[in-house]
């Protein structure tokens, strides 16, 4: 069984050479513990999802919490099937933001919404004067959400401010929001407070913490939860879900999607078949050919970055 550890915290990090030195040190320690996945560093904090042996993940968690300002950073654990690599490589990168909203004036380290636990969250779901917002993207919401939650219909988190502009804080001053692990809500709640919303609540630790802590008979979640690794989704017990994924557009796929005439493994699916130009389609087809050649040799093809969809 492979274990997965997710974490984030907004706390100032040094910039320039000091940040690069930290990146190099953390990458070395993660490799020494046999970990794979992605760790992002920015001046505003750190964010990551890593896979490996539970002992290696816990040892690396000790490394991260030894960084000044991250002593209380929480960690969420889940599992994957033994034959699922979850991640193919380790990436430790410096980014402008650890979650990209595109609004540099938003500072979650200074102010965010009110964090609530699973029990309080269940009560909020039943409040008639409160709007519950799923801050994730449309394709994530499509495979699971909380009953009654509003879908902002975004393709990327940078579109979330456009959705907020359609709301009136004077008429809807009280909102609650959730996301996969909590990090998007940190920025989303801070942004909504900046826009004049009076009361903003956020599910502490996101869907993953909710599923980890809520008793089964009180679980209000419906469907599966999309995750950004080879598992594609997790179920209500945080086990590996039932969805596959389109390599071209990264959307989750059902068995019906993969039975469609528009599905070509590694190239297209019913959701993106009309979104690609010929150059993109040819690049995806060549990548799939290399995957199959590697598989025939008994190797694992991890590939390279592919063209961006329009």
Image: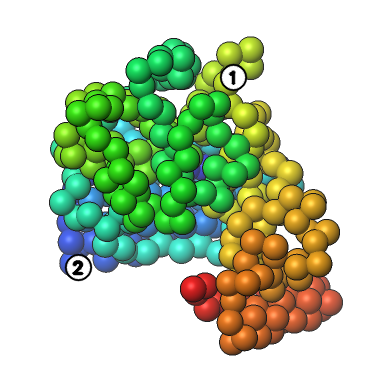
Instruction: Give the number of the mark in front: 2 or 1.
Output: 1
Local crowd size for mark 2, using a 10 Å CA cut-off: few (<14), some (14–19), many (≥20)? few
> From what the image shows, is residue 53 above or below residue 201?
below
> From what the image shows, is residue 178 above or below residue 159?
above
The percent coordinates of residue 21 (x first, y second) are 26, 64
- Residue 108 visible? The answer is no
| Label 2 or label 1, whichever comes before in sequence order | 2
Determine which quarter of the picture holds residue 304: bottom right
Lateral position of residue 289 relative to residue 225, left or right: right
Q: Residue at x 65, y 85 (%)?
A: 282
Determine which quarter of the picture holds residue 185: top left
The percent coordinates of residue 119 (x first, y second) are 46, 14
Lateral position of residue 35 relative to residue 40, left or right: right
Residue behind mark 2: 17
Foreground residue among 307 and 88: 307
Rendering colour mode: rainbow
Residue behind mark 1: 219
Q: Secondary structure at mark 2?
A: helix
Q: Residue at x 71, y 48 (%)?
A: 243
Q: Residue at x 20, y 35 (%)?
A: 193
- Residue 292 visible? The answer is yes
Foreground residue among 310 and 32: 310
> From what the image shows, is residue 248 above or below residue 7?
below
Q: Secondary structure at mark 1?
A: loop
Q: Residue at x 52, y 72 (%)?
A: 309
What numbered label is drawn on residue 192?
Answer: none
Foreground residue among 155 and 236: 155
Q: Number of labelled discs?
A: 2
For the residues labelled 2 and 1, the Cα–Cα distance comes to 46 Å
The percent coordinates of residue 293 (x first, y second) are 78, 81
- Quarter of the image with the N terminus in it: top right
């Amino acid at each position: 069984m492979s274990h997965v550890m997710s974490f984030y915290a907004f706390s100032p990090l040094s910039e320039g050479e000091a940040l690069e030195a930290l990146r190099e040190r953390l990458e070395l320690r993660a490799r020494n513990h046999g970990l794979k996945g992605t760790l992002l560093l920015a001046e505003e904090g750190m964010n990551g999802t890593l896979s490996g042996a539970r002992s290696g993940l816990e040892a690396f968690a000790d490394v991260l919490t030894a960084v000044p300002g991250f002593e209380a950073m929480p960690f969420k654990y889940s599992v994957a099937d033994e034959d699922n690599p979850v991640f193919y490589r380790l990436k430790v990168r410096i980014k402008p933001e650890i979650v990209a909203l595109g609004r540099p004036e938003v500072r979650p380290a200074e102010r965010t919404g009110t964090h609530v636990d699973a029990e309080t969250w269940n009560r909020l779901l039943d409040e008639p004067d409160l709007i519950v917002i799923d801050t994730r993207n449309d394709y994530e919401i499509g495979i699971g959400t909380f009953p009654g939650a509003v879908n902002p219909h975004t393709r990327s988190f940078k579109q979330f401010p456009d959705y907020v502009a359609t709301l009136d804080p004077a008429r809807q001053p009280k909102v609650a929001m959730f996301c996969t692990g909590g990090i998007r809500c940190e920025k989303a709640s801070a942004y909504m407070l900046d826009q004049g919303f009076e009361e903003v609540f956020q599910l502490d630790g996101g869907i993953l913490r909710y599923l980890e802590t809520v008793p089964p008979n009180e679980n209000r979640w419906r469907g599966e939860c999309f995750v950004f690794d080879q598992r594609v989704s997790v179920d209500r017990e945080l086990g590996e879900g039932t969805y596959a994924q389109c390599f071209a557009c990264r959307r989750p796929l059902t068995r019906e999607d993969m039975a469609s005439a528009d599905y070509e493994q590694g190239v297209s699916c019913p959701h993106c078949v009309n979104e690609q130009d010929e150059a993109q389609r040819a690049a995806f087809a060549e990548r799939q050919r290399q995957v199959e050649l590697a598989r025939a040799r008994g190797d694992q093809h991890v590939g390279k970055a592919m063209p961006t969809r329009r």
